[in-house]
Structure formats: structure tokens, C-alpha cells
């Protein structure tokens, strides 16, 4: 299955390497369609269909660490679950010792800090039977507030571009996949999420300017 050429390049293994797409928390949690690029290969990447009309195996996200939980499996592996609490929803980030360096970084992340991740999405089920979207990071960095602020504006701009393009008509295969699975009659909810993110970014910027003036 072919995805938008603007988000991918071919690698030596014959699979497409997808550029990480900045995605807001609201859209992350609305993802419900993930497929393997080549179902016949166990090495084929999994592709997430974003509701705003693009497909990718990687997303970029910067969030506020609200909660962090460390636990162990029966085999003694360390597991980390971080909940990034945002205005729209909560983003759940998971890692275990299969990704040891990433797990170590997540374990060291401080609560009430900001983290930046390049990650893959997966679908899981809660104890109540609800479908949840999980985030598995490949790259983790603890960052300062201005990085979160810039992310909100960048992700909002790119999200709005995708929403506008999809609302004007289906032109790419990615858009067709998104429209077939999610429809296009509720794009306003994603536009509202963009507005919420922009407002959050403005608040962070005002707080930073106020702190600078107080020095």
C-alpha cells in the first residue's frame, strides 16, 4: 500500500521510511486504523492512518508528564508508563526492556516535566474493553517549556493544513484511506482541537514572557 510521498523515503530493506509527523494529542487518541505496509513481512512497519488525511509509521509529540509508573513483568523486565495530561485528552506512552535505552530514558524522566518523543502508535484494549491508542517511543528527550510551546504551534499549523486540504476534496491515497475509515463530516472537531492547542501555546508564551520581564 502506498502512502503520501511527502512523508516517506525508501530504505535499503525495500520499505518506506516515514518522516515523523507532528501530531496533537486529540488526533493521536482518535486513531483507530493501523496496518502493516507489507502483511507478508514480519519486518514491515505498521502504518497509522491519521483522521486528518495522512498515513505514517512515526509521529512526533511533545507533552507534559502528568504521571509516571514503573513496574516489572514476570520475566523481570522493566516497564514504564507515562501519562501526558493535556487540555483535550491524555496521551499514554509505554516502553519496556526490549527498547532498553528508551526505557531507561523514560524511567529517568521527571514528573511535571516536558518530553519530546519520536514514536510509533499501536492499539490496545483497556480492562473495561475500550480501545486505547498507545505510543511506543523510539527517541525520547526531556525538554524545556519553549519546546512544548513551539511544538503546539508547529503541530497546529500542519494539522490545519491537512484539515483544509481534506475538506477541499480527496486527492491522495492517504486522504482516501482516512476518508474511508473516519469520514470527513467531523473535521470541525479536529479544527477545534487545533484552536485549543494554539490557545495553550499562547498561554505558555505569555507565561514565559512574564517570567522574563520579572527577572
Image (cartoon, helix red, strand yellow):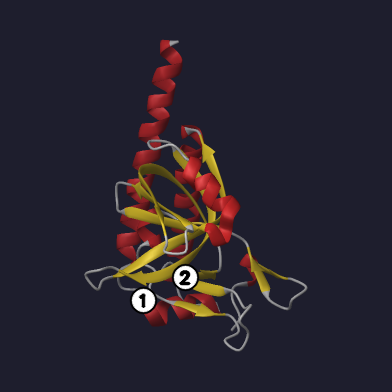
Alpha carbons under labels 2 and 1: distance apart? 9 Å
- Direction top: furthest residue: 215
Residue 50 falls in image quadrant: bottom left
**Which numbered disc flags the more N-terminal residue, 2 or 1?**
2
- Is 147 or 138 nearer to us in this picture? 138
**2 lies left or right of 75:** right
Determine if residue 171 is in view: no
Q: Is residue 99 above or below residue 214?
A: below
Identify the residue under disc 1.
182
Q: Position of residue 135 (x, y in %)?
A: 45, 60
Residue positioned 26% across, 71% down in the render = 130
- Number of marks: 2
Identify the residue under disc 2.
53
**Mark 1 burial class by Cα count in 10 Å: few <14, some 14-19, many 20+:** many
- Is 180 or 112 nearer to us in this picture? 112
Q: Position of residue 166 (x, y in %)?
A: 45, 70
The N terminus: image quadrant: bottom right
In what element is the residue under mark 1?
helix
**144 lies left or right of 70:** right
- Direction left: furthest residue: 128
The C terminus: image quadrant: top left
Q: Position of residue 163 (x, y in %)?
A: 43, 63
Determine if residue 39 is in view: yes
Q: Position of residue 61 (x, y in %)?
A: 48, 51
Q: Is residue 164 above or below residue 80?
A: below
Amino acid at each position: 500500500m502506498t502512502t503520501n510521498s511527502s512523508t516517506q523515503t525508501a530504505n535499503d530493506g525495500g520499505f518506506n521510511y516515514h518522516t515523523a509527523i507532528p501530531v496533537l494529542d486529540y488526533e493521536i487518541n482518535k486513531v483507530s486504523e493501523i496496518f502493516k505496509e507489507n502483511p507478508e513481512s514480519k519486518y514491515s512497519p505498521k502504518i497509522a492512518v491519521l483522521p486528518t488525511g495522512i498515513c505514517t509509521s512515526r509521529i512526533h509529540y511533545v507533552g507534559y508528564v502528568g504521571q509516571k509508573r514503573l513496574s516489572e513483568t514476570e520475566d523481570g523486565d522493566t516497564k514504564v508508563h507515562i501519562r501526558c495530561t493535556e487540555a483535550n485528552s491524555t496521551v499514554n506512552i509505554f516502553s519496556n526492556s526490549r527498547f532498553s535505552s528508551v526505557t531507561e530514558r523514560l524511567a529517568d524522566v521527571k514528573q511535571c516535566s516536558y518530553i519530546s518523543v519520536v514514536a510509533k502508535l499501536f492499539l490496545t484494549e483497556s480492562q473495561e474493553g475500550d480501545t486505547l491508542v498507545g505510543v511506543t517511543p523510539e527517541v525520547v528527550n526531556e525538554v524545556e517549556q519553549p519546546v512544548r510551546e513551539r511544538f503546539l504551534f508547529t503541530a497546529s499549523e500542519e494539522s490545519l493544513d491537512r484539515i483544509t486540504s481534506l475538506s477541499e476534496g480527496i486527492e491522495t491515497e492517504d486522504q482516501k484511506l482516512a476518508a474511508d475509515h473516519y469520514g470527513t463530516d467531523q473535521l470541525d472537531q479536529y479544527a477545534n482541537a487545533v484552536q485549543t492547542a494554539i490557545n495553550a501555546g499562547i498561554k505558555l508564551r505569555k507565561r514565559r514572557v512574564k517570567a522574563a520581564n520579572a527577572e
